[in-house]
Image (spheres, helix red, strand yellow):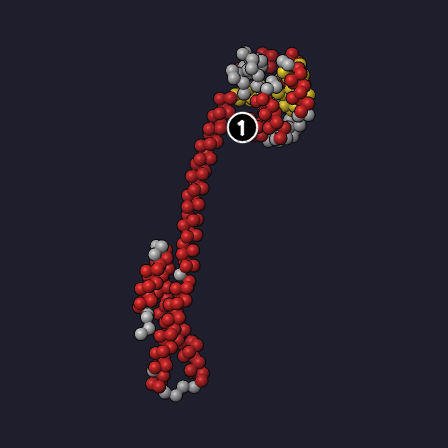
Amino acid sequence: MAVELAKKIFQDLSDKTVLLIGAGDMAELAARCLIEAGTSKLIVANRSTDRAEDLAARHGGSAVAFDSLYEVLPSADIVLCSTGAPEYVIRRSETRQALKGRKKGPVFFVDISVPRNIDPEIAGLDNVFLFDIDDLDSVVKSNIREREQEAGRAEIIIDDEVQALVQQLRALDIGPAVVEVKELLLHIVLNEFKRNRKRLGDLSPAQETAIEDVLIPALVNKLSHPMIVHLRNAAGTGKPSQMVEELRKMIRID
């Protein structure tokens, strides 16, 4: 979360310098995250010089003596503090004095120490942003609430799409039934045509073709349309089989 906040403040971290105060596990984790986010330079300050040099070497940075903290402070854009000190190691008066000559824009302080190691009063200094562990926790919880709200909206969208897909699949299921209905109706109409053909008298080949290829298919489409509509409605409710069976009984050929 500290890295995400740093991105919001600076937009681009590629030319930013990180001053890491402390060399423990949390400090190293934060340093790794900031380097992966693109920061270009790492400076490590720790009461144990050996640990500071070891951490700096593993991440391509440099180490400074803890007593030189305020000397390198003006060159830092991001100051991340994580030590086990029982008192403030970054104090307002010394910080104000150190930043007087800085002309590089804002400084982002992050205090992930428990208890706090950065004096909250420095938040009142010009071009200084300060976040502590409680601030980060609040931002995390706020992000979680926003994600939960978005997840709820996503679930509604998914439910709607699933229902639409189910409707489409059910519509596909009635395809064979539609074909069957039309074939049965066509069979009935053709039989009736053949049964009553003599009553029509002499017909030319063109007239015969017009009846069989135009009139009869038109009649079948006209008769089958309301049946197909009922089939689709039945499919929409998830119970098309009963409707199909009823239609089969209605148009059953004796």
Q: Nearer the viewer, residue 221 or 105?
A: 221
Q: Which residue is mark 1?
A: 1
Extreme residue in the front direction = 254
Residue at 41% x, 47% y is 160
Residue at 63% x, 28% y is 35
Q: Is residue 251 left or right of residue 29?
A: left
Q: Position of residue 50 (x, y in %)?
A: 67, 16
Residue at 45% x, 38% y is 150
Q: Position of residue 51 (x, y in %)?
A: 65, 17
Q: Secondary structure at mark 1?
A: loop
Residue at 43% x, 59% y is 172
| Residue 92 visible from this viewpoint | no
203 lies above or below 170:
below
82 lies above or below 248:
above
What amino acid is labelled 1 in the image?
Met
Q: Is residue 27 left or right of residue 53?
A: left
Q: Position of residue 221 (x, y in %)?
A: 39, 70
Density class for disc 1 (Cα within 10 Å; few <14, some 14-19, many ≥20) is: few
Q: Quadrant of the C terminus?
A: bottom left
Q: Quadrant of the N terminus?
A: top right
Which image quadrant is residue 174 in? bottom left
Q: Nearer the viewer, residue 215 or 11?
A: 215
Q: Position of residue 216 (x, y in %)?
A: 39, 75
145 lies above or below 133:
below
